[in-house]
Amino acid sequence: MLTVKRRTIFFYLLPMILTIAIINLTPILYTLFLSFTNNTEFNDSYGFIGLKNYFDLIFNTGSDLYYVLGLTILYVIACVALFLIIGLITALVLNNPKVKGLAFWRVVLLVPWAAPSAITALIWKFLLNENFGPINQIARVFFGQKFNIPWLSNPVWAFFAVVLVNVWLSYPFFTVVILGALQSIPTELTEAASVDGANGWQRFINVMLPLLRPAITPAAILSAITTFQMFNTVFLITAGGPITNADKPGATTFVMVYMYNQVLNGGVANIHYGQIASFAITMFVILGAITFMARSLGPKRNKEGLA
């Protein structure tokens, strides 16, 4: 039997490890460095100012941190909850052998997930157009020509619209994950529960749901991280608007949209890279902490590695 020393394996992997480390760590470390400086767009002689950017961000009453962070967390909670509910329902339907054409429906299910999100976002922006969008046009046929839903101009409706689009794009992922978990549950367990007198709801809550938890938990964590960093879909539909107060970000200005508007879209006259870097590092720490806490709430594993 051929044996290879660990040191040999390490030296073979060293170039890849160094490359990945440089590519990933260099931007993070440079951003961390900038967060401790007063570097701005027109300031070539910037210097080290310590934690001032972080204090201004966290303790300044005019800071946008809490507004943008709260708005983003609300968006994540709404999206992930709907991912789970709709994905679970569709998975249960597709797992029912009585449904005809299961192969067809499973392929159709993947279309929203497989389609490029940028194209889907632009299509939804057209559908939700207040004046000539098909959704409002069809609604006017039934409710009169004066009927109008301000999908993209009203803060509440705009928030609902971006949640709706993100759910449309992402719920198939939950469906696929839950469907795979459902098909791995032995039928003997549900049959035994049925023999013991459990109805359909009791079988789902007491037998199926605990067995689905190991699959649902990592999917929910991954989806929460992805949704927290959502940019292209929201930006293409609302660009962070609508804006109702000149001193506050728009109703759909989530974390990534806010950073883009501040840095790349001329959000301020003299871009303060130090403040933006401190905002990015703060988001990184918060997201890491939330991910760690969510993972710690997941299913525990015993010594054999079973959940």
Image: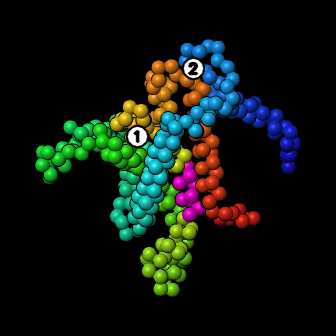
Q: Nearer the viewer, residue 87 or 142?
A: 142
Q: Secondary structure at mark 2?
A: loop
Q: Is residue 280 left or right of residue 87?
A: right
Q: Is residue 55 left or right of residue 103?
A: right
Q: Are marks 1 and 2 in contact (CB under 8 Å)?
A: no
Q: Kindly give the residue lying farthest to the bottom in the view shown.
A: 196
Q: Is residue 216 magenta?
A: yes
Asked whether, in this view, residue 22 is left or right of residue 204, the answer is right
Q: Quadrant of residue 159?
A: top left
Residue shown at the point (81%, 38%) measured from the top left: 10
Q: Earlier in the sequence, mark 1 or mark 2?
A: 2
Q: Is residue 125 visible?
A: yes
Magenta range: 213-222
What type is the residue that disc 2 sits on?
Answer: Thr
Find disc 1 in the rendering and name its residue.
252
Q: Nearer the viewer, residue 225 or 306?
A: 225
Report the residue at 46% width, 49% height from top.
74
User: Where is mark 2, residue-wise?
Assistant: 40
Circle 1 Cα neighbour tier, 10 Å, few/some/many (<14 / 14–19 / ≥20): many
Tag 1: amino acid: Thr
Does 2 sit above or below residue 92?
Answer: above
Tell me which secondary structure the magenta stretch mostly adopts: helix
Task: Classify the position of the C terminus by image quarter.
Answer: bottom right
**Above or below for 41 versus 115:** above
Please tell me whether mark 1 or mark 2 is closer to you in this view. 2
